[in-house]
Image (cartoon, rainbow, N blue to C red):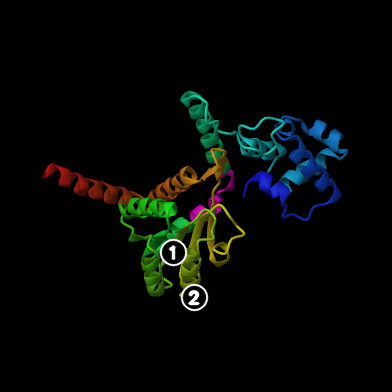
């Protein structure tokens, strides 16, 4: 979950000083990110130690780390926008749009790197290596991401499968066992077919993982491991939100961590699968 959202809906036990700081950072945006600890302390009438403790309550070792994460979350916003993403203008040039998209995507990946939870990725890779089968489930655009993940991971010798049709998802959910891992890709975590599948797989004793942007969704309630990503949104006609880039980033990270964990065997298998694929074009 992004720092802005965590500040807007704090899960910590906030003291009076904490509430002062929450209001300060939400009200001042990027200006607060460039303020020194002395300036923040003076503006909020609290001690330096209280400011440092506040950053730690949100999971950061230092105030600097907290401010970097907040600045990344604010992205391309200026001091007056306070949470509103840069709009895409229908009449702007292609070059202007490209620069905005580049900035948005850089912010998206920075946010994802902050939110992802590296311990979750490490735990997931260990579960994948020890599993009998790894099932990737996704519907719609998430289905394409799930298919890419399964194909990539299968190439290093892991029995990874993907299902994107609701009937196939439920069929294989009914056959899953406690030796398997089920990985759901869902931005909102509210897709009915995936929620029903997760409930069934959970009853079967499978390890459940969600790659998602939400921790308050129905899908999240069934997960053993959650890998979080950010989403960017920008105004274009009626609005647009996208998370594909951040999910691809997570899939690549999982893939590389698996290779690191498995070692030479994975590298050898990857080369063998690559050779097999290339032999198809050579035989034409």
Residue position for label 1: 182
Q: Position of residue 189 (x, y in %)?
A: 54, 59
Numbered disc 1: secondary structure: strand
Residue placed furthest toward the left: 283
Q: How many marks?
A: 2
Where residue 138 sits, quadrant-wise, is bottom left
Q: Position of residue 123 (x, y in %)?
A: 50, 58
Task: Pick whichever, 270 or 94, lies toward us.
Answer: 94
Residue position for label 2: 203
Task: Pick whichever, 53 or 68, lies toward us.
Answer: 68
**Residue found 69% across the figure and 49% down from its top:** 6
Quarter of the C terminus within the rendering: top left
Task: Pick whichever, 145 or 135, lies toward us.
Answer: 145
The numbered mark, 1 or 2, whose residue comes first in the sequence reads: 1
**Residue span colored magenta:** 112-122
Q: Position of residue 19 (x, y in %)?
A: 81, 47
84 versus 117 height, above or below: above
Tell whether label 2 touches label 1 (CB within 8 Å): no
- Check if residue 16 falls in the magenta segment: no
Residue 58 can be seen in this image: no
């Amino acid at each position: 979950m992004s720092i802005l959202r965590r500040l807007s809906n704090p899960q910590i036990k906030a003291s009076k000083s904490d509430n002062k700081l929450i209001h300060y950072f939400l009200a001042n945006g990027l200006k607060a990110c460039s303020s020194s600890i002395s300036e923040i302390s003076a503006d909020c009438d609290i001690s330096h130690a209280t400011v440092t403790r506040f950053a730690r309550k949100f999971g950061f070792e230092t105030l600097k780390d907290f401010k970097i994460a907040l600045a990344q979350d604010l992205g391309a916003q200026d001091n007056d926008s306070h949470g509103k993403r840069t709009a895409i203008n229908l009449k702007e040039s292609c070059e202007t749009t490209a620069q905005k998209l580049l900035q948005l995507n850089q912010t998206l990946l920075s946010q994802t790197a902050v939110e992802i939870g590296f311990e979750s990725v490490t735990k997931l890779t260990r579960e994948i290596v020890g599993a009998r089968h790894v099932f990737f489930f996704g519907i719609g655009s998430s289905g394409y991401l799930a298919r890419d993940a399964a194909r990539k991971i299968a190439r290093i010798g892991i029995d990874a499968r993907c299902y994107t049709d609701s009937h196939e998802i439920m069929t294989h959910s009914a056959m899953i066992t406690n030796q398997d891992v089920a990985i759901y890709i869902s931005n909102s975590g509210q897709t009915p077919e995936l929620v029903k599948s997760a409930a069934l797989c959970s009853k079967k004793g499978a390890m459940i993982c969600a790659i998602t942007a939400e921790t308050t969704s129905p899908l999240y309630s069934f997960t053993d491991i959650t890998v979080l990503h950010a989403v960017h949104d920008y105004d274009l006609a009626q609005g647009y939100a996208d998370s594909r880039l951040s999910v691809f980033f997570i899939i690549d990270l999982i893939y590389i961590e698996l290779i690191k964990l498995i070692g030479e065997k994975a590298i050898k298998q990857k080369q063998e699968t690559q050779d097999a694929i290339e032999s198809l074009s050579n035989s034409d």
